[in-house]
Amino acid sequence: MIKIYDTMTRSLRDFVPLQEGKVKMYVCGPTVYNYIHIGNARSTVAFDTIRRYFEYRGYEVNYISNFTDVDDKIIKAANEAGISTKELSDKFIAAFMEDTAKLGVKPATKNPRVINYMDQIIAFVETLVEKGFAYESQGDVYFRVEKSENYAKLANKTLADLEIGASGRTDEETARKENPVDFALWKSAKDGEVSWDSPWGYGRPGWHIECSVMATEILGDTIDIHGGGADLEFPHHTNEIAQSEAKTGRTFANYWMHNGFVNVDNEKMSKSLGNFVTVHDMLETVDGQVLRFFLATQQYRKPVNFTEKAIHDAEINLKYLKNAYQQPVQETVDSDDFDSFKSQFVAAMDDDFNTANGITVLFDLAKWINSGHYTAIIKEEFAAMLAVFGIVFQDQEEVLDTAIEALIEERQEARANKDFARADAIRDQLAEQGIKLLDTKDGVRWTRD
């Protein structure tokens, strides 16, 4: 059985879906005002891997990941570029789809955008006002945090601690609130900002309300899994829980999952440190599959340290798996041990999607394959395991060109005729092309450098 570390309970829990054989999964996507950075990619890849493993285990996954296309950063960037917020968002949504495709990320079942859910957002806020969970103040609408049961439990915080921390605030917005910790559901429009008409005047949604609306509209009042980066535990996911459960009276998500951060050379990535790296730029010099494989080398909850050496190691290790996958298959081999590899893989990944251990099993399996244990069925199973990590290789027959095939065949004929000088010369010629030959009892095997 798959076990998930649930952030809400701080414990490893058996995964029991709302509906047998199906998973309703919502993952917070990017705010589309720029190209995604390596930290965004870590979250996208981590949850794509989780989704893929659920599918590997036979589940049908309804995978929803949003685009935040209404936000202060978007408005600022659009104004600086002299274009509309929609034009800016369209540009970076397209870039996101292109860049993540190179990382082997499957398209979501649906990628909802805030601008397409404005009527539903307004209706959601109206319901919270009617129920007394929200109030209007000078064109803004705020959520009454003190009415939320166990507020901030997800982030292991208490309302009392938060109120103490906010007690000294004296800014203009705080003055409009009943309580300094109340958060915005709707913001009144400022001059020159994109806005929509509402019962409280022209304005736009607060950041947190959008995900609650899109998740419940598409997946229902209660979902199986809600995921995102660890930085979203508070306030974003905390506020999602508060407003969603206030409206529906039901548990918003049964499991909360959060991925760890990416460091660059052991330092937290930030523009101020000059180590801010966008995936778009990185893909100019790093193969997308290599970058994807690097991000999978650590279990999703653990931090990942981005270094040139780590990328180099990922490239070498990925090549090893590729060489194993592209070995020629045999009609019949002793494959009794394969079931053991498959069981080990499932055990590793069932344990809160431990990709590090799962990849270790793949390397052990590759070594076993290289020793002569490979059939078409095993190749198919190996491909399915690799696909969990977004790894897709071309078959050997598609990669090995006609010239190399002819040389290998000629070498075999030379050896059969005891023309060892010619056989050795062909081996050397192939070596110059990066092809290494291995003579085994089952025939010639090869690897490509």
Image (cartoon, grey):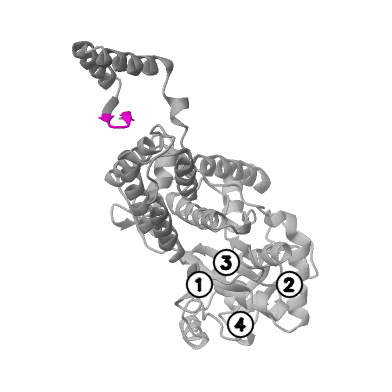
Q: Residues within 10 Å of mark 4 (few under 14, many from 20)?
A: many
- Magenta residues, as a range? 439-448
Of 11 and 164, nearer the camera is 11
Residue located at (33% from left, 38% from top)? 372
Image position of 149 (left or right of 290): right
Residue 32 on image: x %, y %: 58, 50
Which one is earlier in the sequence, the residue at label 1 or at label 3? 3
Q: CA distance from mark 4 to mark 2?
A: 14 Å
Residue 135 appears in the figure: no
Image position of 271 (left or right of 377): left
Q: Amino acid at mark 1?
A: Phe
Q: Amino acid at mark 4?
A: Val
Between circles 1 and 4, the one closer to the viewer is 1
Q: Residues within 10 Å of mark 2 (few under 14, many from 20)?
A: many
Label disc, if present, on residue 145 of the rendered structure? 4
Of 342 and 130, nearer the camera is 342
Give the secondary structure at mark 3. strand
Q: CA distance from mark 1 to mark 2?
A: 21 Å
112 in magenta: no
Residue located at (43% from left, 46% from top)? 292
Confirm or deny contact between disc 3 and disc 2 (CB under 8 A): no
Q: CA distance from mark 1 to mark 3?
A: 14 Å
Label disc, if present, on residue 125 of the rendered structure? 2
- In this view, 180 is above or below 269: below
Confirm or deny contact between disc 1 and disc 3 (CB under 8 A): no
Between circles 1 and 3, the one closer to the viewer is 3
